[in-house]
Image: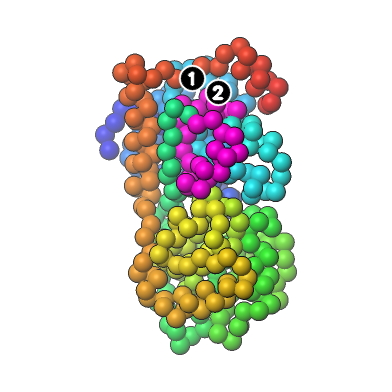
Amino acid sequence: MTSNLKINIFFPFKDSAWGGGNQFLKALRKEFKFLNIYEDIANKADVILFNSHQNLKSLVKLKKEFPSKIFIHRIDGPLYQIRNTDKKTDKLIYIINNIIADGTIFQSHWSKHENIKSGIKLSSYQKTIINAPDPDLFNTQEKKPFNKENKIKLIATSWSANPNKGFYFYQYLDENLDFFKYDMTFIGNSPLIFKNINKIEPLSSHNLSVKLKEYDIFITASKNDPCSNSLIEALHCGLPAVALNSGGHPEIIKKGGVLFNNKKDLIEKINKIASNYTKYQKNIKVSSLHNTAKKYYNFCHYIFIQHQNNKYTPKRINFFQKLLLLGKL
């Protein structure tokens, strides 16, 4: 991709095993660099892509120093539905979005709809783009073939130990799954001590991708998850999924798995995939990181060109907005 437009991702990256947002943005940055559209130094970039509520004080300072740059806000949540907290952080995100963001990227249609219900004022430009993982790691190369004669291997992952990540259902499986037919592993942080489910501590992206390919079916029971990176990673590794009918799961899973609504039908849905494994595996349809990065670029480029052609003026922080931000940050 040849372009003079340069994008900076304004985010506190972590190199170790961390949350899904960190993992996706690292992969996106890598793809931007491959496409020669990334700028490491925010001051030199044409477009600033910032995430949720991270680095807000530095972000406001950057916006005041460079008011003509295009600022794009990547939003998930609503966070209060994920964390079972009040709406304080979501309201702060909405204030920042209203004052600074020239465009907003939602990670699923569910997330956009729920944020609108929760009070976000939409930017002049907005788009929904589902995440994608690093294809050098999360792919079907060396995926273990399914063999129904062996124990069927289930896996669930979560970096967060938040109860909304599905531990109520994992505990049910720990107590009720037929472990003569199935083997199940949980990778990540858990508030529970399992009796029958194998537990592995959080892994790096590389080690996680290798591990995923040893399993047959991915399980996710996270509630109100706007765009589950763990689900996306598993699908990219060729694992059909059983997912709670909640959040952005239906938009991601499509026909590459099945949805469940309660613990009564969870095991039934696992059995359904096990009995029709090849069908569900062939129906996995996921967007590549390359295509996802192009969607991000095209969205940023469109707003940038609108500005260049004097059809859009980037937002500026006025005196009253400055006072509001001083009271919130």
Residue 109 among those drawn in magenta: yes
Amino acid carrying mark 2 in the image? Ile
Magenta segment, which residues? 95-122
Under circle 2, the secondary element is helix
Residue at point 58% right, 73% down?
265
Quick check: can you spot residue 204? no
Residue that protrudes farthest toward the top in the picture? 319
Quick check: can you spot residue 97? yes
Q: Which residue is mark 1?
A: 315
Which sits in the foreground, 73 or 84? 84
Residue at point 64% right, 49% down?
82
Q: Name which quarter of the figure residue 114 lies in.
A: top right
Q: Earlier in the sequence, mark 1 or mark 2?
A: 2
Q: Is residue 107 above or below residue 286?
A: above
* Image coordinates for residue 131, horizontal then vertical, percent: 45, 49
**In the rendered view of the protein, which quadrant contains the C terminus?**
top right
Amino acid carrying mark 1 in the image? Lys
Q: Is residue 240 above or below residue 83?
A: below
Q: Which residue is mark 2?
A: 99
* Image coordinates for residue 203, horizontal then vertical, percent: 57, 60
Residue 139 among those drawn in magenta: no
